[in-house]
Image (spheres, rainbow, N blue to C red):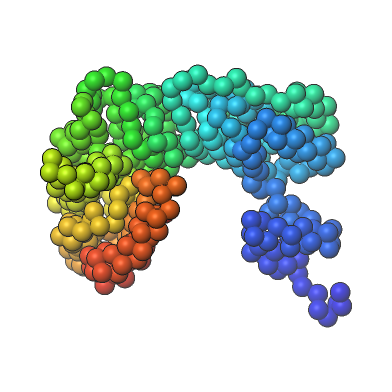
Amino acid sequence: MSPGLALPIETIEAVIKFLDPRDDYRTIVSCSLLCRTFLPVCRTLLWRDLVIAKGNDSRVSVEVARLLEILKRSPEVRLYVRSVNFGFGPGRYSVEYVVEFCALFPALRSLTLRTLHEGALSNILTLIDSIPTLKELHLHDIYMGGESADPIHPDVFIDAYPTLNQITKLASLNATARSQNQPLLRVFSISKCYDIESTWLRKTIATLEGSRHASSLRSFGIEAATLTHRRNYLDLDTLPRVPSFAPHLTHIGFTLNQFVGIHHCIDIASSRTYVRRFCSDLRKCGALRSLRLHFDCTFAYSMHAYFQRLGRFAFARPVPPVLHEEPRYLLDRLAGVLSTPGSPPCPDLEHLSFVFFSPIDWLSGCGAAFARLAQACLDVDDAGPELGVRRRYPRFARLEIRFMISRIIQPDQFVALEEARVQFVQDKEKMMMPMLAPFEQEGIAVDVVLE
């Protein structure tokens, strides 16, 4: 390179960091081979997120063996790994294996476990405290019931681990328990769990509430749709609640369901009681900046589809209109809490997100509810002679609404999915956007998305 064209290495690194390993993998690899000076920043991008792909036992063993061989040749790359994502088959790995594997990466910050049987997480604090540098724990696709498969612990890992320890020497030190002065967990989430025992969720929350991580957590999410219960009646006391450490949280994700009672009927009274209780608990979330609410209407939609199929018969019954009113009830209750007289309950609120497991037209009667929510979020208060008049939620800047059609319509129903997508485009412009106009008129970024 000509001296007249030389750029500071900091500038070149800043340009390389704009590359995304998911889309620009080959480009980053080429940069790492172009110049030794580029190698550290390229390794930061290439090794930051480590994914163990989902597959059968032989595929997992091959991937782990290949990874360990790389670590043997270049043990320094361990220092670049910040997150590990396990995607093995259902129940095919033990927590002990996870801890041993994560011990190889002394700078690990985030861990994601997928398709895991709930029995493997009987003591979640053991997992958290066994990885000293862990700050984020994400659990996806946890499943209940039945027998979990025998945990996989690939022989190739057992054979290679002692040798790898001798090479790196730091891995065994990293496997020690988390001491009192080491970082505590800051992010915890459970998501994409569509049939999980509510008592297990409640127990998990209670475990975190009683741990020393409670004061350090800043983001907490339980996005587990279709909570189940083992009794023949719905006991609201067994359902998860906003945790006691909520005053410290800046983000909360929560699922509110249309509960199924005995005789497979929607328990409207219990569902509304749960919504009221959750919204009331939001008053203690003084540091909240982001709120993401999942509202699951899966069973109600199934009833709707069933009665539609019976519509041509004389004995068919229409779907009770009250089922369509539940999203509106949620919006009304949330608006009521945010418009509480006096000091706003969540003064730093920036982002509201709703995820509806229902067709978009189920929100057709929610115009007045969205108007009340807009008024609650965008209303102004007299802050006194010094500050004058200002919005109650001055940081509020984004509203996001998602519809999870792929969850309530079976993937093999291609015609129904395509019809739902076409209907979504039409209803979004004709129905949803006019209802959300009060937000857009005040400069709020509004997103309506179909998934």
Measuring from the top left, give residue 332's x and y in whole percent: 17, 51
Q: Residue at x 64, y 60 (%)?
A: 23
Q: Is residue 60 above or below residue 32?
A: above
Task: Say which quarter of the image contains residue 322.
Answer: top left
Q: Residue 67 at x, y = what percent?
A: 76, 38
Is residue 154 visible from the viewing direction of this image? yes
* Residue shown at the point (32%, 62%) measured from the top left: 423
Residue occupying image coordinates x 30% and y 49%: 358
Seen at 81% across and 79% down, the residue is 5
Based on the displayed image, in which of its 4 quarters is residue 349 positioned?
bottom left
Within the image, what quadrant is residue 444 found in? Answer: bottom left
Left/right of residue 347 with respect to residue 133 in the rendered view:
left
Give the side of residue 352 with respect to residue 193, left or right. left
On screen, residue 304 above or below 368 = above
Q: Nearer the viewer, residue 272 or 334?
A: 272
The N terminus: image quadrant: bottom right
Tell me where residue 429 appears, x and y as whole percent.
30, 69
Total labels drawn: 0
Give whichever of 382, 127 is nearer the camera: 127
Position of residue 316 relative to residue 450, above or below, is: above
Residue at the extreme bottom of the image, as rendered? 4
| Residue 86 seen in render | no
Q: Point out the image quarter for the C terminus.
A: bottom left
Horizontal and vertical percent for residue 285? 30, 43
